[in-house]
Image (cartoon, rainbow, N blue to C red):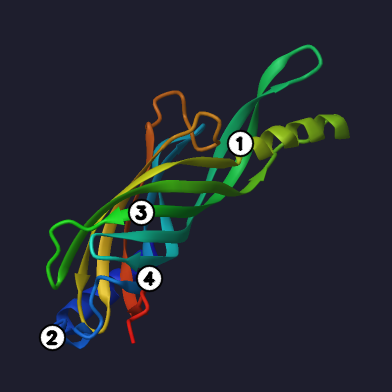
Amino acid sequence: MRPIRALALVLSLAALCAPSASAQEGRQFKDAWFWGAKTGGLVFSSASSNHTAAPLLGGEWLITRTRGGLYLSFDQAFFSTSGAFQDRDVDSSFVRPVELRNLRRFTLGGFVFPAQTDRYHPYGGVGMTLSQVAGASFPTGFSSSQRYAIALDSLQAKRTSFSPVFIGGMQMRLAPFSVFGQATASPNQTGFFLYNSNGGAAFNFSFEAGIRYNVGTSIDRAR
């Protein structure tokens, strides 16, 4: 969790040292481009665990308008866990274990910005997220190359999930950047490795905090 502690320290110092948001008055929140960096934690389940927390790092891009915006992010969670799937031999069916490492997520969503002030910007949004287990391998060997190829097809099919995502958070304007905190929830897909049918959560959650920097306007000004 060192990355989380490091960013939390940076954000705390920024909040103490920033006198006001006046340095950003020339770059308003609406009609703007923001680049951001974040850290946090992912709460997930797998065949061998329930409600497990893993550290997360990522980057993002936010385009704002007056009442809404477009959001794009990439992040990676760091963990090691075990998964499984139903495999089939010539005359039998059995559960084959798989070793899983880390998760990559690509998220695209739309935001709405209710109750805005000059400094505080709450938001909520919905979108879609593409999740992929970064590394997956078999802990045991195979009796033939044909058996390996069949199992590999099943492994690849369960490494990736495409599902809706719900996002809520708050951005606070400081100088010379903004800080934010947000939470995401994405329903588990039964065909994905990060799903546990024996008491696992119906959703995977993440809790994130970071900074966003306003790099300028997102619209062409009339000349």
Q: Which residue is mark 2?
A: 19
Name the residue at 26% across, 61% down.
Answer: 181
Q: For marks 2 and 1, give the CA distance.
A: 50 Å
Q: Earlier in the sequence, mark 3 or mark 1?
A: 3
Q: Amino acid at mark 2?
A: Pro
Q: For marks 4 and 2, give the CA distance.
A: 21 Å
Q: For marks 3 and 4, give the CA distance.
A: 16 Å
Where residue 100 sits: x, y (%)?
59, 44
Position of residue 214 in the picture relative to residue 161 (left or right): left
Q: Which residue is mark 4?
A: 36
- Disc 3 versus disc 1: nearer the observer: 3
- Image disc number at residue 110: 3
- Disc 3 versus disc 4: nearer the observer: 3
Q: Earlier in the sequence, mark 4 or mark 2?
A: 2
Q: Amino acid at mark 4?
A: Gly
Q: Amino acid at mark 1?
A: Lys
